Amino acid sequence: MLPPCVLLIEEALPEIRKRVSKEMYSSGSNQVEISRLLGVSQAMVSKYLKEDIIISTHMEDYIENLCCDLTVTALSNGNRLDMTSKFCEACLIMKSRNVINDAYIERTGYDLPEISCFRIEADKNVSRVIDELVKALDYLNRHPIIDLIPAVKINIASIIEDPDGGYKVVAFPGRLTYVDGKLIAIKTPEINASNHLSSIICAVRKNNPGINSIMNVAFNEDIGSALERMMMKVFYLDRKVSDPLEELGRTDLNGYNYIVDPGDFGIEPCLYVLGNSSLSVTARAVKIHREINIISRK
């Protein structure tokens, strides 16, 4: 007997704890705080901080997304219940999209069994998506990304699937504005609040069902250098060949979490940060900003 959750706990959970420990520590958390939220000893946290990241054969992109979610949840006053719920939700999503199946077959020789976990729903409703967007904004204000703000300002959007297969997109109305060093939203997130990001994320979802959220930031040479140093996979749109939405609608991004639009006459270049949730995209944006600061100090 090997339930899928046991496979994840044995093969993925230690690596997830290690990555979250490193991210929280880099963001200013101490080892005691990290151990409390992850449910491990301080000695284990110290061990995690000294170890290298291990790339997963089957689940790397999902693990990286989950680690971003968990880091933002922890640094936004989340508790151990919040962290556990995030892990279980990610487990269900990976099972529903057959991400775990290859690893399960390799381990057991059998296909993944059909199992429904108790009291857990993978689908997100509107109120939950709104709550995550608010937490994502709070995280950005705890970790400012002033160097990533474009002239057109930024926004974050998350997609919700309708039962009939359609989509709703929730975003901040009027975008987010820096006032006295703080990002301000004029209203709470709403459905259909950003036509631009809605069109981008809906196009991306045609071939990339694991991508649920998007954030637009600036793009310049410094940001490009940061992404290169971070060894991130970046997809570059070609405005001279086709319409960007048509290109995205037929592209399998396959692990690319960053899209560069080089811009055009009267159109500012920008970087679209993708993820499975608004928490993961904001965590990625903060990582880019952190890398820019590291480069500038050298």
Image: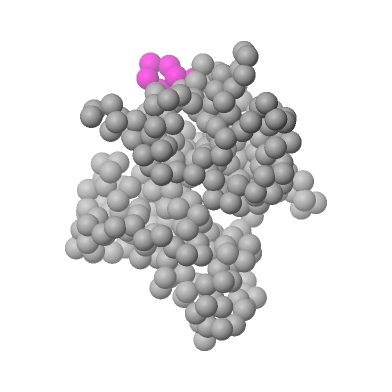
Name above or below for residue 159 compared with residue 42.
above
Residue 231: quarter of image: top left
Q: Residue at x 62, y 13 (%)?
A: 266
- Does 223 appear above or below 42? above
Asked if one can make out residue 139 in the rendered structure from this viewpoint, the answer is no
Q: Residue 36, position in %: x, y?
A: 28, 57
Q: Residue furthest right?
A: 164
Magenta stretch contains residue 109: no
Residue 109 image position (x, y, % from top left)? 56, 83
Visible in this render: residue 181? yes
Q: Residue at x 68, y 26 (%)?
A: 240
- Residue that extends furthest to the bottom in the rendered view of this protein: 1
**Which is nearer the eye, 17 or 271?**
271
Where residue 20 appears, x then y in whole percent? 35, 53
Q: Residue at x 68, y 39 (%)?
A: 248
Nearest the camera: 114 or 244? 244
Q: Quadrant of residue 190?
A: top right
Q: Give the quarter of the figure containing the C terminus.
A: top left
Q: Position of residue 35 (x, y in %)?
A: 27, 58
Q: Residue at x 22, y 48 (%)?
A: 30
- Number of marks in the image? 0
Magenta residues span 177-185
Is 182 magenta? The answer is: yes
